[in-house]
Image (spheres, grey):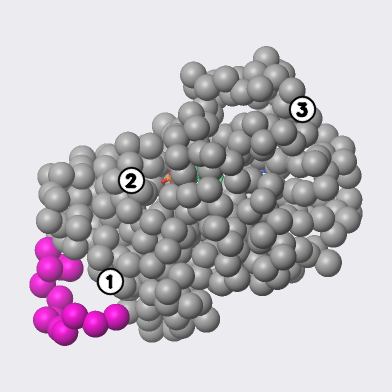
Amino acid sequence: MKIGIIGSGSWGTAISKVLLNNGHEVLIWTREENVFNALKNGENPYYLPGISIPKNIKPSMDLKEVIENSEIIVMAVPTQAVREVANNFKSYYNGQIIVNLAKGLEIKTQERISEILKDILTDLKYVVLSGPSHAEEVARDVPTSVVAASENLEYAEKVQEIFSNASFRVYSQTDVIGVELGGSIKNVIAIAAGVIDGIGGWDNAKAALITRGLTEIIRYGEKKGAKKETFMGLAGLGDLIVTCNSQHSRNRYVGEMIGRGKKLNEIIENMNMVAEGVYTCKALYEEIKELQIEMPIVEKTYEVLYLNKNPQKAIHELMRRELKREEF
Ligand SMILES: NC(=O)C1=CN([C@@H]2O[C@H](COP(=O)(O)OP(=O)(O)OC[C@H]3O[C@@H](n4cnc5c(N)ncnc54)[C@H](OP(=O)(O)O)[C@@H]3O)[C@@H](O)[C@H]2O)C=CC1
Ligand SMILES: O=C(CO)COP(=O)(O)O
């Protein structure tokens, strides 16, 4: 099958490798000439150093060529770029299944990726692929399990079939809202987990943060129409665990640097990859204030990232909130 990957960062490149190994023809769109040339040589040192990519990958700098020649389209650009990129290809889109890999909420609308794409593409066939899956491990064939969700189970099952292999196992389900929100909000909690690592590497505090973070994700998710049980699965708890703990996590890394006293702008300027939680936190903060949804970890993370709050003070304030029953 001919599959087009839109975005040649770390995740788009790692997923290309999975699909090539599964025997598919992969066209990958990049806007960078140096990435285009590197991919032709079977590598992407800018995003996945030290990994070799099968040389039958077909890089292209022509978005129209990739969209028109693909039976399935995989979107692997950061959330804040999805609207712009989809607008750029909407006139070539021909109703193919779109598999979204991005995990985030758009700042200006607070929309999930499926909502953004519905605004732009007519006859959208949408699947979100999400779960605990760091590109650095997937590209090395480390056993990984994710979930494909679509309102139409047939599309999710098709994606499950195409992407699965002995080291990449895909489950299917229909709760698009839950899968999208689990993948998006865990990035904010992972920044907070990184702050704990940066301050003291406290195990007790991190376990509590993950647990109460999951509670916040469930609380928000249920208000938005997601199923609670989705958050106990790969796109919820699974991804929360890996992102809060992994050496590969960019979100956890941002938090760790903040915990060590670095400034957000400085950290972001020195990263060439996206840490989605920085932006999703902003989108969420606006919305939870408006809808009065109680998400204290998200709120404190926002205050630390954007209002210059001292991280130790934020932790103290979380610990000294009014005592309450343990409930969701
Ligand atoms: N890395 C991972 O392990 C995983 C990532 N994800 C999610 O996948 C999404 C992509 O992440 P990832 O690949 O890691 O990100 P990277 O930062 O590694 O790469 C981003 C890619 O998107 C391109 N891009 C950025 N902005 C634009 C734009 N405005 N228009 C067009 N292209 C753009 C970049 O191109 P350029 O080089 O030209 O800037 C680059 O190819 C994120 O939502 C992330 O949360 C999900 C699971 C795992
Ligand atoms: O979503 C991811 C792993 O499942 C990637 O997380 P980071 O963006 O924090 O690296």
- Mark 2 residue type: Arg
Disc on res. 296: 1
User: Residue 204's spot in the image, x, y percent?
Assistant: 12, 56
Q: Is residue 321 magenta?
A: yes
Disc on res. 141: none
Left or right? Give the position of 108 relative to 62.
left
Residue drawn 58% across and 41% down?
A: 165
- In this view of the protein, can residue 31 be seen by the observer? no
**Ligand 2 closer than 8 Å to the CB at disc 2?**
yes
In primary-sequence order, the first of circles 1 and 2 is 2
Q: In terms of secondary structure, what is the magenta stretch mainly? A: loop
Residue drawn 32% across and 37% down?
A: 247
Give the tally of numbered discs: 3
Q: What residue sits right under mark 3 in the picture?
A: 58
- Mark 1 residue type: Pro
Distance from Cα at disc 1 to Cα at disc 3: 46 Å
Left or right? Give the position of 294 relative to 269.
left
Distance from Cα at disc 1 to Cα at disc 2: 18 Å
Q: What residue sits right under mark 2 in the picture?
A: 252
Residue at the front extreme, as displayed: 166
Q: Nearer the viewer, residue 131 or 166?
A: 166
Left or right? Give the position of 163 relative to 90.
left
Task: Describe the element under mark 1 as helix, strand or loop.
Answer: helix
Q: Quadrant of residue 30?
A: top right
Task: Describe the element under mark 2 as helix, strand or loop.
Answer: helix
Answer above or below: position of 26 versus 319.
above
Residue stretch rendered in magenta on the structure: 316-328
Task: Describe the element under mark 3 as helix, strand or loop.
Answer: strand
In primary-sequence order, the first of circles 2 and 3 is 3
Distance from Cα at disc 2 to Cα at disc 3: 33 Å
Mark 3 crowdedness (10 Å alpha carbons): few <14, some 14-19, many ≥20: some
Assign the C terminus to one quadrant of the image: bottom left
